[in-house]
Image: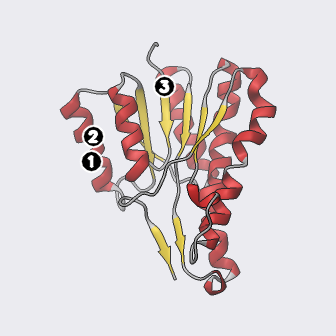
Amino acid sequence: MSALNVLVTGASTGIGRLSAQTLAGAGHTVHASMPDTTDHNAENAAAARRHAQDNEVDLRIADLDVTRQGPADSAMNTVITAHGRVDVVVHNVGHGALGPAEAFTPGRLVGPFDRNLIGAHRVNRAALPRMRHSRSGPLVCVGSTTSRVVHPVLGPYCAVKTAFETLAPAARFEVARYGIEPVTVMPGPVTEGAGALRL
């Protein structure tokens, strides 16, 4: 397989970081995206750069806040400018929401949906026109077993992940004819690296 150009969202820690490192280690060019690379995620961005240097892999940093369309478009433009195309997008952003559902005000409940669900939609809007043009895929959605087995005090997070996971099968009907293959992977529990909103 020839080297692919990959954008991984939520690559600061956990599954996203490991996915970016593994794909880069397999010889692909990986843009590991995360927000606030010069502030909140400065240490994580520096760790990714050290990993790239120490392991001699093509692992790059992209500053991407999925809660705004502008940064999604900018990150995609960076990939396109560097390589002329984007071959794979890995949707991994998964900010937790922990606490009794009743304790979430409507405003606080919107946050996880905006980041985990609408954030992926923003990235799709930036990526899909380019992927249609080059007739490439896949579009990988990192799901969660919490969409299948609902846990107490994880109701809002379970709801978000369930909604998120409908994006891939729905999109498959819309973009398969362009050579793009939306898929969902379902990892098990993550013990470190996943941020959580606790109420």
Q: For residue 98, say whether it is visible.
A: yes
142 left or right of 134 in image: left
* Badge number at residue 5: 3
> Disc 2 marks which amino acid?
Arg
C-alpha distance separating marks 3 and 1: 21 Å
Q: CA distance from mark 2 to mark 3?
A: 17 Å
The residue pinned by badge 1 equals 46
Q: Amino acid at mark 1?
A: Ala
Q: Amino acid at mark 3?
A: Asn
Q: Local crowd at mark 1 within 10 Å, few (<14), some, or many (≥20)? A: some
Image x and y of residue 97, in percent: 55, 71
* Position of residue 147 measured from the top left corner of the image (x, y, whole percent): 64, 58
Q: Residue furthest left?
A: 54
Q: Residues within 10 Å of mark 2 (few under 14, many from 20)?
A: some
Q: Quadrant of residue 18?
A: top left
- The reply to whether residue 12 is visible in this rendering is no
Q: Residue at the location (63% across, 72% down)?
A: 155
Between 123 and 2, the one lying in front of the other is: 2
x%, y% of residue 138? 61, 29
Q: Which residue is mark 2?
A: 49
Pick whichever, 130 or 51, lies toward us: 51
Task: Identify the secondary structure beneath mark 2.
Answer: helix
Q: Secondary structure at mark 3?
A: strand
Marks 2,1: beta carbons within 8 A:
yes
Quarter of the image for residue 117 reads: bottom right
Along the viewing direction, whichever of 22 and 153 lies nearer the viewer? 153
When the figure is inspected, residue 60 is found, relative to residue 40, above or below; the finding is above
